[in-house]
Image: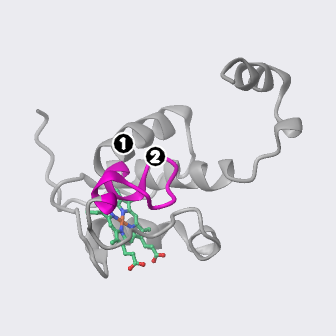
Amino acid sequence: MPRVDPAREAPQPQTISRDLIDRGRERYGVFCTPCHGQDGRGGGMIVARGFPPAGDLTAEPLRRAPAAEIYGVIGNGRRAMFGMAQMIPSADRWAIVAYVRALQLSQDAVVAGLPPDDRARLEATR
Ligand code: HEC
């Protein structure tokens, strides 16, 4: 395990790379899916077992919220959600924010608007 000082804040990434989103997706799966669900809508396993309903990460107010606010919630928590600054290094928190943005955008993507390659891949999964 690499030793990272969780208290050290990484700057917000200026560009969103494929690698950043992939890292975010992987970390989201570990830390967020249990409550917020794979699609971000809040129906995770822990919630199904009685934890207070987790927020819908794809809802309008969070789409409008600045990235720094979502980053802050991951580190500091909000209402029933505990902060995870001690568990998730700062750079990974930013990667998760990038992935949450991707989830938000994916909710109302129009299939017809996808590039042909992506569209073919999506249709192959049905
Ligand atoms: C143990 C369950 C749990 C885990 C794990 C968890 N959350 Fe939450 N989350 C909640 C709950 C509960 C709330 C508060 C919902 C409310 O009161 O509206 C919340 C709220 C939020 C909010 C604010 C929603 C709003 O509308 O104000 C964001 C953003 C968020 N979580 C992101 C994340 C991310 C990203 C992760 C993973 C790093 C994560 N959460 C992990 C349970 C969890």
Figure quadrant, ligand 1: bottom left
The residue wearing badge 1 is 29
Instruction: Decide if residue 20 is on the left or right side of residue 16.
Output: left
Based on the displayed image, in which of its 4 quarters is residue 18 positioned? top right
Density class for disc 1 (Cα within 10 Å; few <14, some 14-19, many ≥20) is: some
Q: At which x and y percent is residue 106?
A: 67, 47
**Considering the image in quadrants, where does the C terminus appear?**
top right
**Considering the image in quadrants, where does the N terminus appear?**
top left
Instruction: Decide if residue 66 is on the left or right side of residue 4.
Output: right
Instruction: Decide if residue 63 is on the left or right side of residue 122.
Output: left
The residue wearing badge 2 is 38
Please determine whether, in this image, residue 108 is positioned above or below residue 82. above
Give SS at disc 2.
loop
Residue appearing at x 51%, y 54% in the figure: 100
The answer to whether marks 1 and 2 mark residues whose Cβ atoms lie closer than 8 Å is yes
Scheme of colours in the image = one colour
Q: How far apart are marks 1 and 2 (CA)?
A: 7 Å
Question: Mark 1: which amino acid?
Answer: Gly
Residue appearing at x 43%, y 52% in the figure: 37
Q: At which x and y percent is residue 75?
A: 28, 67
Mark sitting earlier along the chain (1/2) = 1
Residue 20: mark: none
Question: Mark 2: which amino acid?
Answer: Gln
Please determine whether, in this image, residue 63 is positioned above or below residue 19. below
Q: Does the magenta stretch include residue 109?
A: no
Based on the displayed image, in which of its 4 quarters is residue 63 positioned? bottom right
* Magenta region, residue range: 33-48
